[in-house]
Structure formats: C-alpha cells, structure tokens
Image (spheres, grey):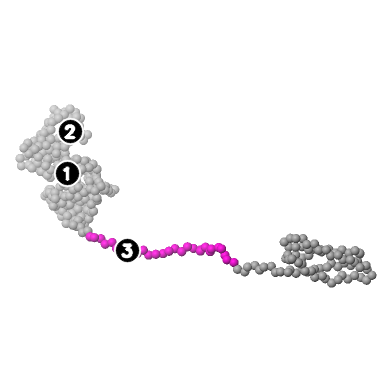
Amino acid sequence: MVLPSVMPTETENLTPQPPLQVERGSPTPTLTLTLTATPSSTPTFTASATQSSTASATRTPTFTAAPSSTPPPIPATFTASATPTPSQTPTPSFTLTPSATWTPLFTSTPSNTPTLTWTPRPTGVETPIPAGAARLADHAPVGGRIERPNGVARYFFDGVAAARYTIAVYPAPGSPLIPRVEVYDPDGGWILLADVEYAAATLNGVRGVILGNVQLPLDGTYALFIGGSGGSTGDFVVGFGRTATSGGISFQTNVRGDLPNDMRAAIQSGGTRDAWTLTLSANDVYDIRASADADSSILPALDLIAPDGTVIASAAGVPNAPLAQLQGRAPQSGVYTLHVADARGLGVGAYRVVWGRS
C-alpha cells in the first residue's frame, strides 16, 4: 500500500484507525505492521499487514500524515532588470540667430546710362548667332529698320585675322535715324564703336558712320549691334567690305558690264567699287591703265580677278603718281573681272580706263 507524499520531516506522526472487528468464533489474528521509508525528495511510505491465521475479514488501515512544518513563503516582490525602450526618439528643434548683420561698404553707381538696350557680352564669351540670323555678304549692303526708341538690330559677318575691312551704316533717304554701331569679335569681346561723335561721315548726302580699313584680330564670325543715338528710329543701310589687294577701300559693288577698250566712267557714291568684265584667252598678254580726271577726288585702285576667283594682279596710284597700271599674262581662258575703287575709301569722281591684249 502506498501512502500519500508529504514534505520531508524528521518524524512522521501516524494516527491509527479504530481496531479491526473480527467475527465471534474466529481465530484471533496476529497483525504485524512494518513501515519502510524510501529516501527521496518526497518520502514514500509502504505499509503491509500480515496475520498468522486466516481471518474472515481484513481491514486495511489508513493513515493521515501531517507535515510538521510549513514550507517557506515565496518572496512577494522583485526588481525588474529590463529597461523600457521608448517608441520614438524626440527631434530637437532650435532657431538660428545670426550674430552679426553684413552691411555693404559702398553702393556701385554707374558712371553713365547706355543709349541702347543691349548689354555687351564679356570678353572670352562667344556671341551666340541665332537661327536664321541676318548675315552680311562681302560688298553686298542690306537695308534694316529700328522701329522703337533704343531698339537694336543684330547682323553678323565672317572675317579673317589680319585682313582689313570697312563697315558702314547710314540712314536711308529721308530717315531720321542717327546710326550707332558696336562691333564684337568672335569671342564676344567689344572692339569697335561708331556713332555721331566718332567715325561720322557723309555718304550720298546723308550723315552716317564709317569704320574704314579696320584690321580684324581673329578668324571667325563678328557681330554688329546697330541702334539709333538719342532714341532715334528709322530705316538704314548696312554693309561691310574687305579691303582689296590693291588697297582699294569699299563696302558695296556697282556692276558695270563689259569693259570697252577705252572708256570713261565715274564713282558716284562713296565706298563703292565699279565691277567691269573682260574676256581673255589663256596666255593672252594684257595691259590695263586707269587714271582720274583732274577734278576727281578718287585715287584709282585696280584688281584683276580670274574666272576661278583668284586675284592675279593689283595696282593703285599714289598722290604724286595717280596712274594705276596692270600688266601680265592670263593664266586661263574665260571671263575676268576688273574692280575699280578709290584707294582712300570715300572719294567720288570720274576716271578713265584704257586696255588691250596681245
């Protein structure tokens, strides 16, 4: 028989149950109680009863074990070792207050007020050429117009370094425009100015501006900014021309036609060159001479151009020897062009050309 588990103690107190009842006439049994304790964390007791004679009834005694002591109580409180983690981290906010206020030492005041509305580009910055921009051709003037006060017109032309060019802008007949011109090189650098106070000239009875026989610094495309001084408006003519090999100065061409062997003509407008044509065969020897009339203000300058555009001969008179003469052999057959211009640029007047071939 197995007894209930109890807390281990030094002595177990057992309370016996009432005595076993036996029927009359039966032999008296002899009961021997043996207790065996098995040591463990929780002791277990086993009770067994034996009798020396046979009995008609057997009763199994029961026992109640009472612990002699009470287990120690579990501590009621404890200290947690974990630290709570906040769900978000606060972001500090602050306001920056400057410690000082900067005050400029001076205020820049422009020394003058520009007459025109454009802003010159700094040197070293290429002047942009808009799509469809007006490009000038050598010795082919074009007309333009300034429609509002302080308005600007832009033109472009191609130049060659070290070559010399003449640029002219003058009012169209009846126009009140007082021209003003600024010239910018291919890098955007301002290089020239022409207005009524500088480089003014009278052309065909009107007052315009001329930049004559100017040597250009760079290869590339040059820009002209044209406006009206004093807010003036109106129509104008603009042109440029490369100085001839002979030294003739002009910016426009007057096409004359075939050149007679002996003819008289006149340059009627300043800055104009006459263009004559003549036919030569390969190896023809030519002799061409030009002189100015006594009352003419021109100093003749001659350039002979072959059919392929090459200048093959040039000559110009000087004040003490005003005759200009070309002599040579034609390199190819075809139509040649003779340019007659004034070596000083703005002269007008009559001249004579005599020529022959052999």
Q: Residue at the spot x=15%, y=53% of the render? A: 178
Which residue position is annotated with label 2? 312
- Residue at screen point 77% across, 67% down: 12
Q: Where is residue 352 in the image (x, y as percent from the top left)?
A: 9, 37
Q: In this view, does 160 lie to the left or right of 54?
A: left
Find numbered disc 3 in the image and state the secondary structure of the residue it sits on: loop
Sequence order check: which comes first, mark 2 or mark 1? 1
Residue that label 3 marks: 99
Please identify the dominant SS of the magenta region.
loop
Q: Nearer the viewer, residue 294 or 226?
A: 226
* Residue 302, percent from left and from top: 13, 36
Tell me, yes or no, whether the highlighted magenta stretch contains residue 98.
yes
Decide which of tag 1 and tag 3 comes sooner along the chain: 3
Instruction: Write the residue at 7% across / 42% down.
Output: 296
- Residue assigned mark 1: 214
Asked if the magenta segment contains residue 82, the reply would be: yes
Residue type at mark 1? Val
Q: Which sits in the foreground, 318 or 357?
A: 318
Query: At 74% across and 66% down in the image, what residue appears?
Result: 10
Which of marks 3 and 2 precedes in the sequence?
3
Amino acid carrying mark 3 in the image: Ser
Region of the chain picked out in magenta, as a range = 78-107
